[in-house]
Image (tube, grey):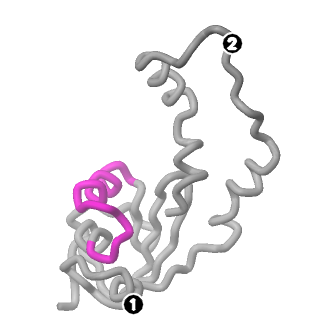
Amino acid sequence: MSKTRIDKWLWSVRIFKSRTIATEHCKSGRVSVNDHKAKPSSMISAGEMVHVHKNGYQFTFEVLKIIEKRVSAPLAQEAYQDLTPEEELNKYENWFSGKARPEVRERGAGRPTKKERREIDSFKGDFILLTSEKG
């Protein structure tokens, strides 16, 4: 097969956990092919450059093979070449190093309630995701 949908390819080579997530990223403009924003139904072929904005990182991939069905991770890595610069992958490590202080809660306040926990998590936002997930 010489062409396939971009959302299907992103899911099959394991860039995204589900096809729905890949489709949402395409719809929101966080995926581009050859410097043009890609709709989920955009067709790609071998040799094209795919740029994905995911979790605060800008990934760049070159399509080597077209795959339509999800395959194992070693087989999926043969379908693309990761051209993401090393500085992009390490940008948050350099920014966060040595800046975090331990969290402090007032004495006697006890454990946070569910509501307080949700507020804390929303306040922290994506920063925790960025440091724990590398792709």
Q: Which of marks 1 and 2 is in front?
A: 2
Q: Is residue 5 left or right of residue 106?
A: left
As drawn, the residue found furthest toward the top would be 108
Q: Position of residue 16 (x, y in %)?
A: 35, 63
Which region shows up in magenta? 12-29
Which residue type does callout 1 highlight? Glu
Q: Is residue 47 visible to the viewer in this orientation of the structure?
A: no
Q: Is mark 1 on a helix, strand or loop?
A: loop
Which residue type does callout 2 highlight? Glu
Q: Where is residue 110 in the image (x, y as percent from the top left)?
A: 57, 14
Q: Circle 1 is placed at which residue position?
A: 78
Q: Position of residue 127 (x, y in %)?
A: 59, 42
Residue 26, image quadrant = bottom left
Which residue is at a point 41% across and 84% down the rendered structure image?
Answer: 77
Residue 14 lies within the magenta run:
yes
Q: In this picture, is 115 found above or below 126?
A: above
Which residue is at a point 56% across and 50% down the rendered structure image?
Answer: 130
Residue 3, image quadrant = bottom left
- The numbered mark, 1 or 2, whose residue comes first in the sequence reads 1
Q: Circle 2 is placed at which residue position?
A: 106
Q: In this view, does 32 lie to the left or right of 95?
A: left
Q: Is residue 48 visible to the viewer in this orientation of the structure?
A: yes
CA gap between label 1 and label 2 equals 52 Å
Q: In this picture, is 108 found above or below 63?
A: above
17 or 3: which is nearer to us? 17
19 or 1: which is nearer to us? 19
Q: Is mark 2 on a helix, strand or loop?
A: loop
